[in-house]
Amino acid sequence: MGKLILAMNVSLDGYVDDAGGNLVMPRPGPKLFQYWIDAVAGQAATIYGRRMYEVMRYWDIDDPAWDEPLREFAEAWRRLPKWVVSGTLGSVGPNATLVAGDIEARVRALKDRTDGTISVSGPQVAGLLTSAGLIDEYHLVMRPFVLGQGKPFFHDARPPLRLVSSERIDDETMGLIYVPA
C-alpha cells in the first residue's frame, strides 16, 4: 500500500504561489534543488492538480541550456507515473493518466495498488485529499519568503497535525514533516 504525501515549497506565511497563480519564489539553490531531485527520484507516483501539472510540463521537453542537475530532475520527473486530476483537460502528456469522476475512489485505488511514496502537488487537489483523510504525511519545505497572499499550502482543509521530523536542507530552507494528529 502506498503512502500519500503532500510535498511542496511553501513561503513563511504559508503560501505556495501568489494570488495570480505564478510561482514567485526564486529558483532553489543547489542543495535544495538536489533535495527535490532525490525526492522525485524516490517516488513511486505523483498526483497533480491541473494547474500544477501544466507548470511541471516544462520538464517534458529538453532544453540544451540545462545543466546536469536540471537534466537529472527532468529525467526523474519523466520516469515518474503521473495522475492528473482535472475536469477541464481533454488529454495529458507522456507517462500521465487523466483522473476525473470519483477522485477520492480513484486515489484510494491507486494508493492500494502502489508500493512506495505517492506525492500530491497542487493545493486544491491536496485540500480535497486532505478532507478525505487520504494524506499520510505533509512535507513542508519552508523557504525564506513572505508572499502575503495567494494559494495556501492548506487549501480548504485544516487538519490537526503532529510534527515528526525536521531537517535543515540548506542555509535558508527547512524541511518539516507532519502527520495527521
Image (cartoon, helix red, strand yellow):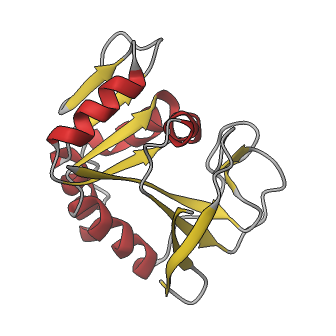
State the count of labels.
0
Q: Residue furthest right?
A: 148
Name which quarter of the figure residue 109 lies in: top left
Q: Residue at x 57, y 63 (%)?
A: 181
Is 104 left, or right, of 10 in this rendering?
left
Q: Position of residue 53 (x, y in %)?
A: 42, 35
Q: Residue at x 36, y 39 (%)?
A: 47
| Of the pair 156 and 151, the residue shown nearer to us | 156
Q: Position of residue 127 (x, y in %)?
A: 58, 39
172, above or below 126, in the image: below
Is 83 left, or right, of 142 in this rendering?
left
Q: Residue furthest front?
A: 181
Is 81 left, or right, of 59 in this rendering?
left
Q: Position of residue 105 (x, y in %)?
A: 34, 24
| Of the pair 52 and 14, the residue shown nearer to us | 14
| Of the pair 158 and 51, the residue shown nearer to us | 158
Q: Residue at x 78, y 64 (%)?
A: 146
Q: Position of residue 140 (x, y in %)?
A: 55, 65
| Of the pair 108 and 168, the residue shown nearer to us | 108
Name which quarter of the figure residue 91 lies in: top left
Q: Residue at x 50, y 35 (%)?
A: 132
Task: State whether residue 93 appears in this view.
Answer: no
91, above or below 41, in the image: above
Is 113 left, or right, of 32 in this rendering?
left
Task: State whether residue 13 appears in this view.
Answer: yes
104, above or below 10, in the image: above
